[in-house]
Image: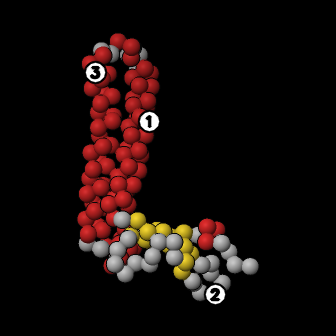
């Protein structure tokens, strides 16, 4: 009984000339499970990576903020005395900083795809 396509492991491939078709099944050596190809446009992959970078940066900033508040509180400083302006500026910084990193990630990935590094030298992207 042959495995259904949806049960096969999937590999992500950049959509471009010469790439396997989306949902194509690639046969592998004997004893190794076949794989199904999933293709995506370079800008979509770059956007996904940028969004992931933003999420990771935002989570890191939130955790760092929590650590900073705990440290300041441990030093005996009353955090509730911090003015609204300082709080607003800090909140904006926590959200904006990862956004800058995500934009750089998006540009970097688009350059990678434009230079075809994912095709010519995939190990440096790992």
Give the spatial CA distance, label 1 vs label 3.
Answer: 18 Å
The residue that mark 3 highlights is: 86
- Where disc 1 sits, the SS reads helix
The residue that mark 1 highlights is: 63
Q: Earlier in the sequence, mark 2 or mark 1?
A: 2
Can you tell which quarter of the image residue 46 is in? bottom left
Mark 2 packing: few (<14 Cα in 10 Å), some, or many (20+)? few
Q: Position of residue 50 (x, y in %)?
A: 35, 52
Circles 3 and 2: CB atoms closer than 8 Å = no
User: Can the viewer see residue 71 in this picture?
Assistant: no
Give the spatial CA distance, label 2 vs label 1.
Answer: 48 Å
Which numbered disc, 3 or 2, marks the residue closer to the eye? 2
Q: Position of residue 78 (x, y in %)?
A: 39, 14
Residue appearing at x 65%, y 72% in the figure: 4
Task: Work out which residue is located at the far right of the displayed protein and give it.
Answer: 1
Give the spatial CA distance, label 3 vs label 2.
Answer: 63 Å
Q: Earlier in the sequence, mark 3 or mark 2?
A: 2
Image quadrant where one finds the N terminus: bottom right
Name the mark on residue 30: 2
Question: Is residue 34 left or right of 53 when viewed as pictured?
Answer: right
Residue appearing at x 30%, y 43% in the figure: 99
- Where disc 3 sits, the SS reads helix
From this view, report whether residue 29 is shown above or below residue 92. below
Which numbered disc, 2 or 1, marks the residue closer to the eye? 2
Image quadrant where one finds the C terminus: bottom left
Question: Is residue 3 left or right of 62 when viewed as pictured?
Answer: right
Name the mark on residue 88: none
């Amino acid at each position: 009984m042959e495995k259904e396509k949806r049960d096969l492991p999937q590999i992500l491939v950049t959509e471009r000339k010469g790439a396997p078709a989306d949902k194509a099944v690639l046969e592998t050596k004997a004893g190794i499970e076949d794989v199904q190809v999933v293709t995506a446009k370079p800008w979509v992959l770059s956007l996904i990576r940028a969004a992931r970078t933003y999420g990771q940066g935002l989570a890191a900033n939130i955790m760092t903020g929590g650590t900073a508040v705990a440290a300041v509180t441990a030093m005996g400083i009353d955090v509730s005395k911090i003015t609204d302006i300082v709080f607003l500026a800090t909140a904006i910084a926590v959200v904006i900083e990862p956004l800058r990193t995500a934009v750089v990630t998006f540009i970097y990935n688009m350059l990678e795809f434009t230079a075809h590094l994912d095709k010519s030298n995939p190990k440096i992207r790992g």
